Amino acid sequence: MGDPAADGLGAMGAWEFYLVVLLVYLGTDLLAAWGLNLEFGVTGVANLGYIVTIAAGAYAYVIFTLGSPASAGDFQMYVGGFGLPFPVALAAGVVAGSVVGVLIGITGLKRLRQDYQAIAMLVVSLMAATVVSADTPFLNGNAGLVLLPNFAPLSDQDPEIQRWAYVGIVAVCCVIGYFVLRRFTTGPIGRTLRAVRDDEYAAAAIGKDVVLLRLMVQAAGGALGGLSGALLVGFIGGWSPGAWAYVETLALLTAVIVGGMGNDRGVSVGTFLIAILILQGVQFLNDVPELKALEAQFNRPALTQDLGWIVLGTLTILFIWFRPQGILPERRPKYGEVRG
Amino acid sequence: MGSAARPILEVSGLVKHYGGVRAVDGISFSVERGTITGLIGPNGAGKSTALNVICGFLPPDGGRVLLDGEDVTGQAMHRLARRGVVRTFQLARVFGGLTTIENLLVAAPGQRGESALGLLGGGRYWGKSENEVLGRAREMLGAFGMQDKADDYARNLSGGQKRAVETMRALMTRPKLLLLDEPMAGLSPSLSRQLEDMFLELTREGLSLLLVEHSLDTVDRLCSKVVVMAQGKVLAEGRMSELRTRKEVQDAYVIG
Amino acid sequence: MQLLIEAIGFGIASGAVIALGAVGFSVQFGMSNVLNITYGALMTLGAYVGLFLIDRGVTVWIALAIAGILVGLVSVAFNRGLLAPLMKRGTRAFAIVIVTVSAGVVLQYVIVVFAGPDAKSYGEQSGQTFHLLGMVLTASEVTIILLTSVLMLGLHLLLTRTTLGRAMRATASNRVLAQSCGIATDRVSDIAWMLSGMLCGAAGVALAITTVSFDFSLGAVFLIPMIAAAVLGGIGQPYGAMVGGLVVGIASEVAAAFTNPAYREVVAFGILIVMLLVRPHGLFGAVWATRRLMA
């Protein structure tokens, strides 16, 4: 949950800028939530390490966009540095997320109970965070990486146009992402994935290759996560281990559970509520002077963020207790009469 | 090409350790093509475990399984299912979050919608094959008298209905060999009879069945051959009428 | 060589604390069949309660006892109020684990709101340094090792020599059967959660004692090595967790001494992942544990 690098607002007013930020965050959060929903809501893979696919996408984007470390005076250390244009870097993010998604999925393949699988994936994400933090030459360790130039697409334009153009890019990616999602959640394949979710052994008993299906879903879910991360870092301009702590998966999970698991529209609604109302609401409140004074007085610099997490965690528990199907439950599919 | 004389299933020397015990202790028997074979025996005899190993749910610790002459020992369950060996479970495992008709639709083999091309092509690509499958599914629901439950979530069905759905689902896969674990349990007598008639009809069309059943009446009516198991071993193999009188079979049921 | 022995010494000290926490975690899994991720935040709670008491002049070991009791009570309430009802309703295992992860996050941030995000410390608690067989241990570390050993022995005696212990073992292995034998399984459960909660709180304080400074992430950080220890020893089984704790502690310290200190955590993660993938019922796990772990 970082702040976008505000490199001069230009002609844009504060409110307009804030709207841009909101839209970009909404778009990237939607992509991530759809990916997690595909894995968790539709196929039943409780991927508590999902945030790593987002991080992989972000880091891949950065190391593909940046020039070599030496060209910037070696002030940050990292592998790669290919200095490639925006679309290539974005594609790299998608691929990285996909690969990482599959790798995480492999840890969940063993015939373990779902909660164990969930913990295994969570541990994978913690491991990844620790390794990246510790191994500085890899991705600049704990300090993270900073993008320069910021805003790779259309960097020769007005900042105002740049920003709205970015919103447009995010919107297009969302349309594509939604299209991909629908391909997986509707029709025979969607039915099969839900069957795997409900009972993977019964699914195997009727000939479904559960391992292959799961890996496919992990690849697709990871791709969406990677795209989300790449788009986000392109806007924010920097990425560090602090940005992908394991609690971030919780925010997405809350969105999926609150909105309605397994259900594309429900998850979208949930993401809007969580990403916008709560997460951005928290950011917004953070800037309110009265609250800032309160925070300074009691030495609670991140008070609104902390309260935000408390609200999210409580919401998740409340929904699992009272309404596990979410705000918009899965719609019961109806099949028409045989045609012809 | 399998010859008509070769059994569809041959099990030889099958062994399975389970929880420190030899649940299946070197069993051998065969199922002839187009017949119904019963697997009977007292509780704890190892019948369900044997079924679990034959269908690939559990890996064997020894022995061989031949499907139509081909060695399929230890292959994964979904591979065997695609070859036509499909099983049902003792406690009916329906897909609760799917509707009744979806439970049937999902079982149809070789659906175009499930391939990579299907993902790319979308509804236009798999619409027609989906239609065909839908027709078969509706027919089967009708045959079992469950058309009105087609759009209900399977988790809301009664126990007996769930069992029927499981059997229907298995039939939708167009199997060669059906492994059924107590298919009649919980079904009404009329539905039981219907199911029995359906099985007999299907065997005339070439389907083979291996049935684990406790109801000796059902076994009597359906099975041309019976395999009696006790304590992990095969006691006897033959026609029900002959075996009924044999002492060791009677003893097995008493001692358990 | 000297480095190795010293590392083993550190490993025994940290292993004792990990064992303390791992046993409580294991008991909760054994009794209620749940992976209680909130355990981490509850340890943090213990550490902060201890801090509160120490800042007001309470001796550190008394503070440990009080913190333990408090966390024990909270744990019982947590199980009775949230986990047990959800499980009775048939909520699926992964939903329960999400609930415990969420509850852990909520508790952790409540602690931050009340106590602040800055690093805290118990102050100088180490006491004298001892040199034993080439290992360097402080007085407080030795006390913790002794304390852990005493508590483990007490638990062992409870489980094997008392009626209550037998009832606990029966309930853990087959709740329905235990009920039909007339055991008040709910009450037995409460006691198990109280005892394991006390171990949890004590572990939190022990962690705070043995680290120079800590913050709200204390429990979360050390939870993973404890889960690794519990799984290594065979989850659900307290004895395995004791051994597991030592193994994880020593392995982590030795790895840290010979490679990068930051990789201390990675060792625990690695052990956990490998165990889950290769041998989920642990080194000493019984067959019944295996059945519980498989889907």
Image (cartoon, rainbow, N blue to C red):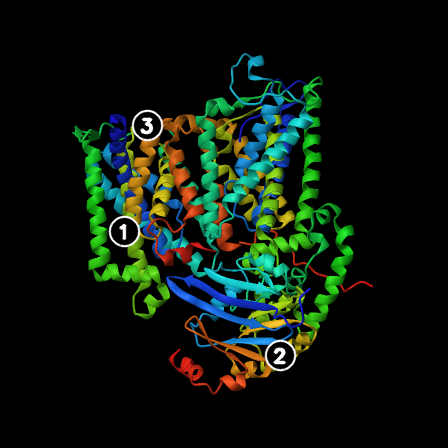
Q: How crowded is mark 2: few (under 14 residues within 10 Å), some or many (20 or more)?
A: some
Q: In the rendered image, which quarter contains the C terminus of chain A?
A: bottom right
Q: Which amino acid does label 2 sit on?
A: Glu
Instruction: Provide the secondary structure element on which disc 2 rests.
Output: helix
Q: Toward the viewer: A103 or B236?
A: B236
Tell whether C88 sits left or right of C72: right
Label 1, on which residue? Answer: C195
> Closer to the camera: disc 1 or disc 3?
3
In whole angstroms, how far apart are the C-alphas of marks 2 and 1?
Answer: 57 Å
Q: Do the residues labelled 1 and 3 touch (CB within 8 Å)?
A: no
Q: Residue A190 appears at what percent x and percent y?
A: 65, 52
Depicted A181 relative to depicted B183: above or below: above
Mark 1, chain letter? C
Residue denoted by label 3: C257
Give the amino acid at mark 1: Leu
Labels 3 & 2 near each other (Cβ < 8 A): no
Identify the residue under disc 2: B196
